[in-house]
Image (tube, grey):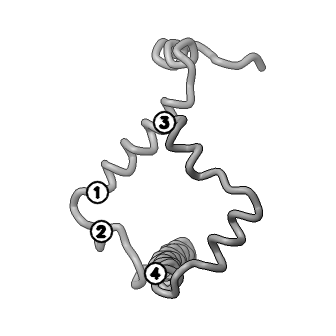
């Protein structure tokens, strides 16, 4: 590994010589690869931005009382009301310590008044 990494050490003079004498085909390959990565990254970013925008708009409409925009009945069966209640309850329980969970189970107060 050490021998291989020593091949990648360039002095500024060697680096300048390498860049100036690089073939046009190799430069085009590097440019093409960078361009392809930029296109893929831009497409994925646009998809994510659009998806998060639409989700935010749906949430705003639903919380504003626009029942035609998105309702729980429009969700697939696997996202039923019971599933959301269980999911949120689990998130709350995971934030509690073992002691607090035992206190809740026994009905003991968990905070001093």
Looking at the image, residue 11 lies above or below residue 92:
below
CB atoms of marks 1 and 3 within 8 Å? no
Q: Position of residue 73 (x, y in %)?
A: 29, 70
Residue 67 numbered tag: none
Numbered circles on residues, count: 4
Spatial distance from mark 2 to mark 4, Cα to Cα? 47 Å
Look at mark 3 in the image and give the residue it sits on. Answer: 1
Q: Is residue 91 above or below residue 34?
A: above
Q: Residue furthest left?
A: 77
Real-space Cα separation, disc 3 to disc 4, in angstroms: 27 Å
**Disc nearer the start of the sequence (1/3):** 3
Q: Disc 4 or 1, which lies upstream in sequence? A: 4
Residue 112: x and y in percent read: 75, 16
| Marks 3 & 4, CB-CB < 8 Å contact | no
**Precedes in sequence: disc 2 or disc 1:** 2
Cα separation, mark 4 vs mark 1, equals 51 Å
* Point 78% across, 20% down: residue: 113
Callout 2 secondary element: loop
Tell me whether circle 2 and circle 1 mark residues in contact (CB < 8 Å): yes
Image point (57%, 17%), residue name: 100
Taking the image as drawn, is residue 37 in sight? yes
Mark 3 neighbour density, 10 Å: few (under 14) some (14–19) many (20 or more): few
Q: Which residue is mark 2?
A: 75
Q: Residue at x 70, y 19 (%)?
A: 111
Residue that carries the numbered disc 1 in the rendered image? 80
Q: Is residue 55 left or right of residue 84?
A: right
Can you identify the residue that label 4 sits on? 29
């Amino acid at each position: 590994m050490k021998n291989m990494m020593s091949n990648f050490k360039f002095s500024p003079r060697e680096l300048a010589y390498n860049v100036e004498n690089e073939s046009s085909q190799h430069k085009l390959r590097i440019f093409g690869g960078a361009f392809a990565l930029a296109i893929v990254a831009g497409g994925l970013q646009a998809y994510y931005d659009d998806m998060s925008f639409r989700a935010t708009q749906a949430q705003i409409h639903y919380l504003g009382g626009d029942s035609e925009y998105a309702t729980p009945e429009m969700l697939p069966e696997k996202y039923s009301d019971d599933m959301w209640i269980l999911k949120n309850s689990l998130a709350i329980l995971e934030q509690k310590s073992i002691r607090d969970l035992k206190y809740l189970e026994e009905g003991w107060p968990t905070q001093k008044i």
